[in-house]
Image (spheres, grey):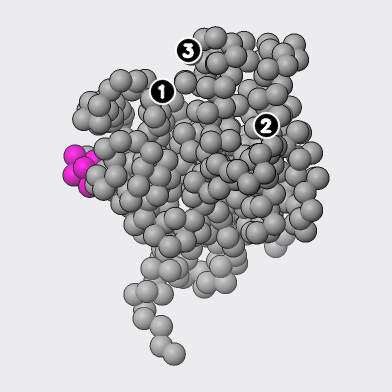
Amino acid sequence: MIINKHIMRTTNEKQVLQQIVNAGPISRSQISRNLCLNKVTVSDIYSQLLHEGLIREVGHGVSTRNGGRKPVMALLNVGYGYVISINILRSRFSMITCRLDGRSDNYESVSTRDVDLTTVLDMIDERIANTIAASDSRLLGIAFGLDGVIYENQILSAALKGFKSFDLAKYFSDKFQVPVVLENLANESAIYERDFAGEGVYQDLISVTIRDQVAAGIVADGHLYRGHNGEAGNIGTCPLADRYHEGSSSTVNHFVAEGPVLQRIMAYQHIDRVDVNRIRRDYLGHRPELIAILDEFAFYLGKVLGDLSNTFAPDAIIVNAPILELLPEVMDQVREHVDRLSIRRKAPLLLSKNAKEASLTGGASAIIHKALGLDDLQLTFKNERSAVLEEVES
């Protein structure tokens, strides 16, 4: 078997850059040892990356026991450029800028209540343009996340009106002349758990996001599993048997999605907007109406997570839900319901460490992979930003 030299060269370049991203600061000799490549090949690639400005040298490491010259250490040059990640939800969009090492800043959440699609696109366009104008480095790519089915960068179905079949990627790629990646929120959250929170630990995981819809992002053997036409993880429309009425059923979205649960809470509170402080106060005060609603939510979510655990046998299932970030104690009820199920596989059930920004940061990772030409390779980041609870809109 003869391996094409150009393909082999490209593979080596990708692996050297991957080493610098994941293990930097790192020396050329250490890269050579890690990859089992000869030092001349590594030095040639290293020099090219340095010339392009993708990496930078940051001093010297420790010499070997035999003495000799101290090795020069290299890091990814985070000043080379930045990416933007945007999530579009039912009544708002959120946005972060992110450096190439995964560290993010400039979080912004913008209400789009009673705003049409064209205006939403104009609002996003304006904020991207403002970010570019204020930055002293260049934009390398944009990621968009939304609820729906997305395949090969096309929106096949969406919870938001007007987005189905709209070529969002081309629209913004043409405007800003950068690559654009589209992904659904659950897949973005799964990327975050793989690349940030898990720090390479979880090779088989499921991230369940509970927003306008309930969806699962599935990582199998370190790679995102999309299924036929990107339909994997579309669990919100699956039927779920009613707890009290035998033979009756509704969808997972009806029992577990954020909107219906919050509507039930607002109904007993006789208000038309979500008050997170009151929800927390009622929970700590054991308000019976709230306790009953949350018990229903925990029961049905337990059924969903139990089925996923038994079917996919992941290393872990991570739940991303604002209601559980507000009331993490409810997750213990969910675990109790799963423990009662007669299933063989019960994976650890965890809460996302950053429910508010997980999908945004996962989107940033996806576009960083694209910008660096490392789509098929594992990158491990450490995001040092602290999460801040954001009020949930009805």
- Horizontally, residue 116 falls left or right of residue 344, namely left
Q: Residue at x 75, y 33 (%)?
A: 333
Q: Between marks 1 and 3, how big is the CA–CA gap?
A: 21 Å
Q: Identify the residue at the far bottom of this view.
A: 1
Q: Which residues are magenta?
A: 170-175
- Horizontally, residue 17 falls left or right of residue 383, namely left
Q: Foreground mark, 1 or 2?
A: 2
The image shows residue 290, relative to residue 159, as above or below, that is above
- Residue sitting nearer the eye, 180 or 30: 180
Amino acid type for the residue under numbered disc 3: Asp
Q: Position of residue 270 (x, y in %)?
A: 55, 9
The crowd level at tag 1 (other Cα within 10 Å; few <14, some 14-19, many 20+) is some
Q: Position of residue 307 (x, y in %)?
A: 66, 52
Sequence-first tag of 2 and 3: 3
Q: Residue at x 46, y 41 (%)?
A: 185
Q: Between marks 2 and 3, how big is the CA–CA gap?
A: 21 Å
Element assignment for label 3: loop
- Residue sitting nearer the eye, 35 or 120: 120
Which residue does the numbered mark 1 point to in the structure image?
109
Element assignment for label 1: strand
Q: Position of residue 293 (x, y in %)?
A: 66, 25
Which residue does the numbered mark 2 point to in the structure image?
296
